[in-house]
Amino acid sequence: MQLNDTDLIIKAQKGDQNAFEELVYRYDRNVLSVTMRYAIHEDDAKDLYQEVFIRVYRGLKNFRFQSEFSTWLFRITTNVCLTYKSRSKHHLKVSLENHYQDDENEFNSKEELIYDGSSPEEISSGADLGEIVNSAVESLSPKQKMTFILKHYEGYKIREIAEMMNCKEGTIKKYLFDAVKNLRKKLSPVYV
Amino acid sequence: MKHNEYKKLLQLSLFGELNSREQTILKEHLLTCEECRNELEDQKNLLELISGKKESTVDDKVLSAARYQLRGALRSEQSNQNIFSSTIDTVSQIFTTPLKFAVASVAMLLIGIIIGSQFFNNNPSEEIVVQNGNENRFASLEESISISNLRFIDSDAGDGEVEFTFEASRPVHLKGKVNDPQVQSVLTYAMLNEQNPGSRFNSINAMDSFGNVAFDDDIKNALVTVVMTDNNSGVRREAIKLLNKSGYDELTKKAYLFVLLNDSSSAMRIEALNFLIDAAKNGHSLNPNDVNLVIQKTNNDNNDYIRIKSKTLLEEYN
């Protein structure tokens, strides 16, 4: 009979490596899917995946079942992704400007990513559509990008994303609206 | 409701986030508002364009490689925890018992004495010299919190002895039989954690040169971790050679397969392939999934020897 998450977690907390491995295998495809969407480069995505499960391994003994394991796991995943710095800086320039966000009463950093390729002219000149879409998603700020990936590609509800990213639903909606607005701006030459 | 509010509803509807009441409100508004109908059409087009890239990006091979790497990292994590957990547990127990105030007072006193001695005593710190048979000095190693800067004085274990210095809470100079479990414990720690690749290499080499390593689980796990994760190919190669001497089992098989399928160094891939061929000749088997992975990966290997030799491997396993 297949054990549920709670049983596996209790066994893993007692040092059962097989139980931990079983737990990893239940969710790791979804985690890797998110990290691959987020990081684009495969090596970076695998590094993020590894970092997530190392943190889970370290933190599991203190897991007190106050949330679903999957929620806790994806909260770690989003944290790891949002704090990640790519091995290859490639073509993105980041300017950071801290600002106080009234509606959340939290101090956030506003990352304004400027993609310095693919002007509308270049886009309309017939570059690969997939790459253009990837570049546009890549050009979003980390929180906008993470919200958009979790919502659009992974299909999570806004309520679930808010739990994963540890903020209010209203904030997630704002990230989502801003993401769509920015994507429209970037991609308007290829879909209008 | 303001026009902008409808626009927000419109976006949420595209993401399937409206309840039935909100859906009705939006539907009624769309009947009378051309701007919002155009907006809806526009956003649908946008999301359709992006959905073209929506299919799952997780390839089985990538997932399998990520799992292998994770296993290596977890083994390294476990080795570190094994070394430190008893010390940390002891310390944490002290600080969670009613004795904590007494312990804190004694600790403050000791800190005061240490700071005072730094001010009034100009003698450089004395090295601990540990030699064979000096059990009391040797035991002090177990209390050390970290080991770093391991430097070999004599890494040739032909005479059964190695000699090196390293830093724990303070510099330690150690000389002992290479097959001594405590010497091996330090060498195992060093091969995993030393910053200097030369020291990692020498640690493995010292264990190897005596030719009489007692391969317990810690040493074997450490070697597998080095084989799979060390960033220096020379260190990885030394580790895989020593690992091969530990005998063939499920763990070593996985390590060889990982190297054959993922290592960037062709020399490493060749070593792994040869070890797998030797194991096959000795009657060991691979499961069909592993065989398929080997076929897929080695067919595209840029090294001629690997492409040809992998056929020998598959013939042996068939």
Image (tube, grey):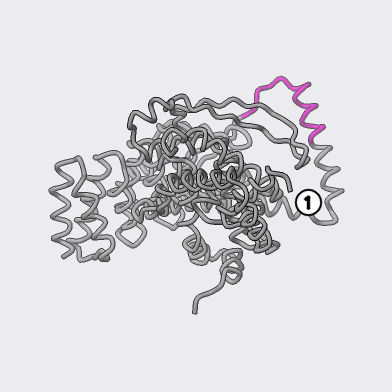
Of residues A2 and B257, which is closer to you in this image? Answer: A2
**Residue B201's spot in the image, x, y percent?**
38, 37
Q: Which residues are magenta?
A: B111-126
Q: Amino acid at mark 1?
A: Phe
> In the visual, does B16 lie left or right of B4?
left
Magenta residues: mostly which secondary structure? helix
Mark 1 lies on residue: B95
Q: Looking at the image, which residue is at 33% across and 55% down?
A: B246
- The residue furthest front is B32
Of residues B79 and A152, which is closer to you in this image? Answer: A152
SS at mark 1?
helix
Q: Looking at the image, which residue is at 77% across and 27% down?
A: B117
Quadrant assignment, res B130: top right
> In the visual, does B295 lie left or right of B86?
left
B117 in the magenta segment: yes
- The residue furthest top is B122
Q: Is residue A78 visible?
A: yes
